[in-house]
Structures are given as structure tokens and as C-alpha cells.
Image (cartoon, rainbow, N blue to C red):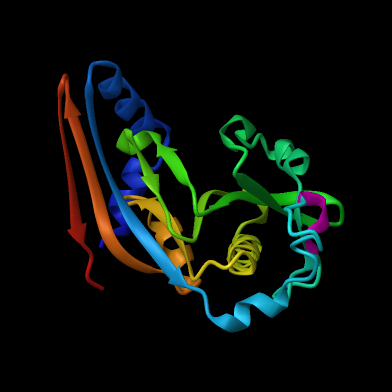
Amino acid sequence: MVSPSLWRLTRNRYGRAIYEFLAQVGITATAMREYVADLPDDTIPEIDHIIRTDGSLHESACEWTSQSNPQFTVVSCPDAAASLNAPLAEKLPTKIAFVVRENGATRGYLFISVNTTVPIDVLDCELSFDGGYIRRVCVDQTHRNRGVATALITAANRYAAALGATQTTALVAIDNRPSQALFETCDFRARRTRLYARVGPVSIRRQLPTTQ
């Protein structure tokens, strides 16, 4: 477990600047916890119109009111995510962008893909995920701790379940304690830790089981 003091030391612009400087000179080290949530059968009926009657995906057809906060509307709409400077260039054709809106304003977003292989830049590899893969969970700083991220993850789980997935996965850096707490609150469990390190041309990869 990462102590609160450690993540505060690394999760700031100074820690990021040091990381980027070392990467430029060929030194990189990354440790990501792989979080997994099982999707029970009763997840599926809570989605309305997530899939068109012809079976194809249709982003604009996905919209509903969050059960946790009736003021939130969850909708699949990449253009709305752009208002929070979402890195839409990273949204591959196989990914869907969900956003939470409140009174017409975007409060947060995430990307999700289902049964796909995706590039994981910080691990310098591609990984294939059975079921849903959630990434880029972002909430507007002035609207955090109000249930926005929980509404987004719930939407992603419902979307994946509607496509037949039995689990969803997320990768979280070991020094990102707030994100770890978020996924743990949403019933995700840490399954393993993926390690990657590179010094010049030499690189190593390891997977360690995570016990909680």
C-alpha cells in the first residue's frame, strides 16, 4: 500500500518533470496495479438503448440519469469531453467516451473499450483485455468528491455488460492513491502489479500477484 505522503510527493508537476527528464535520458520505471471488477448479471438490465436494434454501436443512443445523483446525466459524447481537454486523439475507434453532464455542463469523462488490444505507453507494450478496459477517468477539479467518477465507472460497467463482458479492468499507477481508492470503492480488486523498467537499451518486465 502506498502511503498518503508518498503519492503526494510524486503526483505533482515536480514529480512529473523528474519522470519526464529521466525518460529523455533513457531511464524509465513504471509500476501499475491491475484492478478488476466482476460484472453480475443484474448489471445488464439497467441500461436502456445502449445497443441499437440492429446490434451495432451507436454513441448518441446511450444516455440515462445517474441513480446516485439525479442531477447527473451520463451520455456517450466525445465532443462534450473535449470541453475538459480530453486527449481525444487517444480514443481509438474501438473505444467509447462517456461523460457526465450537469445542467448542460461536462463534469467528467472516461474512455472504455471492450474485448480489444490497446497500447499501454507507460509499460511500452500492448495488452489484450477480456471484457471492458477503462482508462482516462477524469473529473473537473472543481466538481470532485460529488460522485461524478462513480457515475462514470458505473456507466462503463453497464456498457461492457451489455456487450456480454463479465468483467472490467483498469490500470492504476501504484503512487496514484486517489484513483486506487476510487476503484476499490467501486468494487474493483487489485489482481496483479505490472512492472516495467528501462535503462538505455536494457528493459525488464515482471508481473507480481497483489494481495489485499
Extreme residue in the top direction: 25
Extreme residue in the right direction: 103
* Picture layout, residue 58 above or below residue 44: above
Q: Quadrant of residue 196?
A: top left
Pinpoint residue 89: horizontal percent, then vertical percent: 60, 29
| Depth check, front residue: 47 or 190 | 47
Give the extent of the magenta segment: 59-63
Q: How many marks?
A: 0
Q: Is residue 2 visible?
A: no
Q: Is residue 116 left or right of residue 208?
A: right
Q: Is residue 203 left or right of residue 161?
A: left
In reply to whether residue 69 is colored magenta, the answer given is no
| Depth check, front residue: 97 or 20 | 97
The main secondary structure of the magenta stretch is helix
Locate the C terminus by quadrant: bottom left
Pinpoint residue 123: horizontal percent, then vertical percent: 31, 38
Residue at the (39%, 52%) spot, across then down: 172
Pinpoint residue 95: horizontal percent, then vertical percent: 60, 45
Q: Is residue 191 visible?
A: yes
Extreme residue in the bottom direction: 42
Extreme residue in the front direction: 54
Residue at the (44%, 59%) spot, across then down: 130
Locate the N terminus by quadrant: bottom left
Residue at the (30%, 65%) spot, across then down: 191
Pinpoint residue 58: horizontal percent, then vertical percent: 77, 51
Residue at the (61%, 61%) spot, across then down: 156
* Picture layout, residue 91 above or below residue 89: below
